Amino acid sequence: MPDTILVVVEQREGKLNRVSWETITAGQAIAAATGWSLEAAIVGGNAASLAAEVAAKKVAKVYAVESPKLEPYTPDAFAAALKQFLAAKQPKLVLMPHTYQVRDFVPKLATAMGRTVISDCIGFKHEGGKLVFTRQMFQGKLAADVSFTSDAPWFATFQNGAFRGDKAEAGASAAPVETVAVEIADGVIRNKPQEVFKEAKQAVDLTQAEIIVAVGRGIKEQKNIEIAKQLADALGGDLAASRPICDSGWLPMDRQIGSSGQTVAPKLYLALGISGAIQHIVGMKGSRAIIAVNKDSEAPIFEIADYAIIGNLFDIVPPLIEEVKKAKAGG
Amino acid sequence: MKILVCMKQVPQKDAPLKLNESGAWIREDVSYEVNEPDAYALEEALRQREKHKGEVVVITSGPPRAQQVLREALAKGADRAIHLEDDKFVGLDAFNTAKAFAAAIKDEQFDLIFTGLQSDDYGYAQTGVILAELLGLPHATIIMQIEKSDGGIRVKRELEAGYFQFVDMPTPAVLTIQSGINKLRYATLIGIKQAKNKPLRKVALADVQSALGENLQKIERLYVPQKTKKTEHIEGPPGEIAKKLVDKLRNELRVL
C-alpha cells in the first residue's frame, strides 16, 4: 500500500473555508513528487453535506468525519475525533491550512499522538527521496528546510497563499465518499464557545480599496501618521496599518492588515516603515504592486516589494506628496 | 490566582542575523530581547493579579543570557522566576521545550498558564498548546481578554478578519496571549531594585532530562530566502526619488 497524504479541509459555518483548496493543491503537488496517494477529510457536525464539493477534486477518497459533538468547534472535540480517525487510517502525512482554528488544535492532536507539527510552511522539497518543508523564521529574515525525525503520521500546516487554491486539480470523476462516525465521550469537551461575532462597526472596507498606504512601526509616533494620511488622500487611496500600530491605539482595528485583520490585494500597496513580519505579509502579498519604504535594507518587506526605497520615510514622503499632487493637477 | 507566564528570549527585531558554521542555526553573537507576545502575556498576568490577588511566576529556558528576560519580568512585578538554564535548551523542539516546562513545574499548581501566541524567532505557535495537552488542561489560543466567571474564566478569542469569539472555560487552563491585549508597563526603578531580592530558581538540564526525548523534527538548513520577485530600487536624493516614483505610478502602474 502506498503511503497516504491526508488533507484535512476546514469548514466555517457550514461552508468550506476556501483556503482549504490551497491545501489540496499542496497535497496534489506532494503526491506528484512522492508517488504517495492523496485523500481528504472534512471534520464537523455535518461534514457529509460538504463532502461532494471536495470529492470533485482529484483525490482518491474523501472522508466525512462526523459527530454532533464536533459542532461548534472546540479543540478537545477536534483533537479527539481526529486522533481516533488517524489512528485507524494511519496516513503518512497530514496537511492542513495554517488557520487560527488549526493552530488551536493541531499541536494538541499531534502531542496526543506523540507526534509533531511543522507549522506555517511556505513550500516543500523532495530531494533524494527525502521530504522537507520550507518555512520562514526570524520574521521572514531567514528560511528553514525542516524534516521530520519522528514516525508517521507527520503533520504540516501551510501558510495562506503558499499555494493557489485555483490550481487544485479537478478529478476525472467524483471521488468516493465515506462517512466516519467518531465517538467523543462525555466530559472530553471542556470549553463552551459562544457565537462568533465581528467587533464594532467596520467603518472602512480595505478589501475594496484600489490604493492603500500602510504604516508600520517606522512611523514612530501617532502624530506622524498624518503625513501618511496626506499621501493616501493625494493618491486617492486608503490608510492602513500593521498590527503594532493598531495595538497602540494609533489607528482603529479596522485599518489593520494581516492575519488578524484584513487580507487585501489592491492595485497598489505602499508600505511605509513596515518591516514585513510574516503576520503582516500574509495579509497583503497578493497586492498587484508593492512599494516599500524602509530605513533597513534587510527588512523582509523588500523580499516582496516591486519597488524598494531604502531610506527615511520622513525625508521621502513629503516630497512624494508634492509630486503626486503636481501630477494629479496635470503637471 | 496563581499564574505562570512562559517567556522566551529571542534575537532583537533589527538584529543582523548570520548563519553559523553548521548552516542550521544562527550565530548567537547578536542582541536579544523578550519575545514580544510574551511581554503582553506577562502584562496580562500582572493585571489579573492586581484584580484578583495571587502570584505571578515567570519561567524561561535557555542559556545564561536568558536570565535577562526573567530579571525584567521580576522588575515589572512578577513574584518569582524559574530558569531552565543550559545552552542545549535552545536546540529543543517545541515538544521537548513544553516537556521541560511541565517537568520544572510538576510540584506546583497554577490556576492559569500563559504563553505568548507565538515566538518571533520560530513562529510555530505551538508550545502553549502542547503544554496544555501534556498537563491535561483545557486551553484557548490568541486571547484578547480574560474575565473571571462563575465556572472559571470567560476569554475572548481572536479569529481572522476581525472576528472574535467568547469562550467559557474551567480553570486551571492554558491560554496563549495575543499582542495588543493590553498596554505594556515599564519597570520602575523601585521594581528593578526589588527584583534583585526575588527568588530565581535554576533548573539544570539534568533535572528534567528524563522527561525529554529526541527532537521529532530537525532544521536541515537555514538560509537567506531566495527571492522570486524582481525588485527595482529607486535611489537618489528624496526629491529625485519622489519624481522617479511618480513617474512609475503614472506610466508603469497607471494609478495616477
Image (cartoon, rainbow, N blue to C red):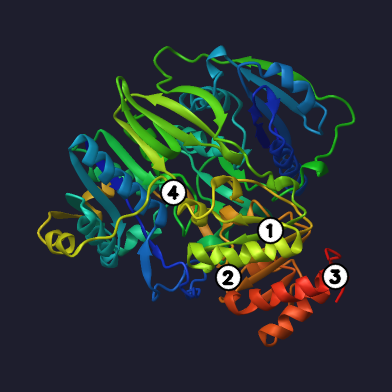
Residue type, numbered disc 3? Arg
Q: Chain of mark 4?
A: B
Q: Chain of mark 3?
A: B
Q: Position of residue A103 (x, y in %)?
A: 52, 39
- Residue annotated with mark 2: A299
Q: CA distance from mark 2 to mark 3?
A: 26 Å
In the rendered structure, the answer to whether residue B224 lies left or right of residue B203 reads right
Q: Which mark is residue A127?
A: 1
Residue B211 in sight: no
In the rendered structure, the answer to whether residue B65 lies left or right of residue A314 reads left
Q: Secondary structure at mark 3?
A: helix
Q: CA distance from mark 1 to mark 3?
A: 45 Å
Q: Give A165 or A315, whichever is nearer the viewer.
A: A315
- Looking at the figure, which quarter contains the N terminus of chain B? top left
Q: Position of residue A234 (x, y in %)?
A: 73, 65
Q: CA distance from mark 3 to mark 4?
A: 38 Å
Badge 2: few (under 14), some or many (20 or more) residues near its Cα, within 10 Å? many
Residue type, numbered disc 1? Glu
- Residue annotated with mark 3: B250
Q: Earlier in the sequence, mark 3 or mark 4?
A: 4
- Residue annotated with mark 4: B180
